[in-house]
Image (cartoon, rainbow, N blue to C red):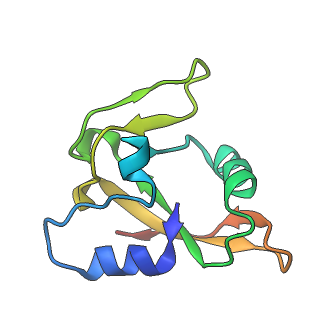
Amino acid sequence: MLPADRWAAWRDGPAGVRYEPEGFAADGFVHCTDGAEQMVATANRHYRADRRAFVVLELDLASVGAPWRYDDTGRRYPHVYGPLARAGVRSAAPFHRAPDGMFTTIGEASPA
């Protein structure tokens, strides 16, 4: 997931520009999550107070242009060890929220 305005800027920006999420320099990787249920839980745990609009990207890990691996034993949270190539984005979908800020569902995806 990423803020909708950052997705729009990256999607509509110059070709070849790679995406680094907020916190990438400190973490050294891009946090990812497998599955909608895990994504909703993760968003509510870490981003509920952030009132910006968000989108959820579906990635093709083989095409993100950087090495990746699962670092957790449950294999639910792949980490990508480099900025993301736009070619690795399969689709983007709006992340719906309740009035209290709680993330609820992922909307209908549109091609990246």
Q: Residue at image x 26%, y 61%?
A: 86
Q: Residue at image x 77%, y 64%?
A: 104
59 to 55, vertically: above or below: above
Q: Residue at image x 57%, y 72%?
A: 54
Q: Residue 112: image x %, image y %?
A: 34, 69
Position of 2 with respect to 51 (left or right) is left
Position of 67 with respect to 16 (left or right) is right
Outermost residue, top side? 73
Position of 21 with respect to 36 (left or right) is left
Q: Residue 31: image x %, image y %?
A: 48, 45
Position of 10 with respect to 74 (left or right) is left
Image-quadrant location for residue 9? bottom left
75 to 56, vertically: above or below: above
* Foreground residue among 35 and 14: 14
Q: Residue at image x 42%, y 47%?
A: 26
Image-quadrant location for residue 65? top left
102 to 24, vertically: above or below: below
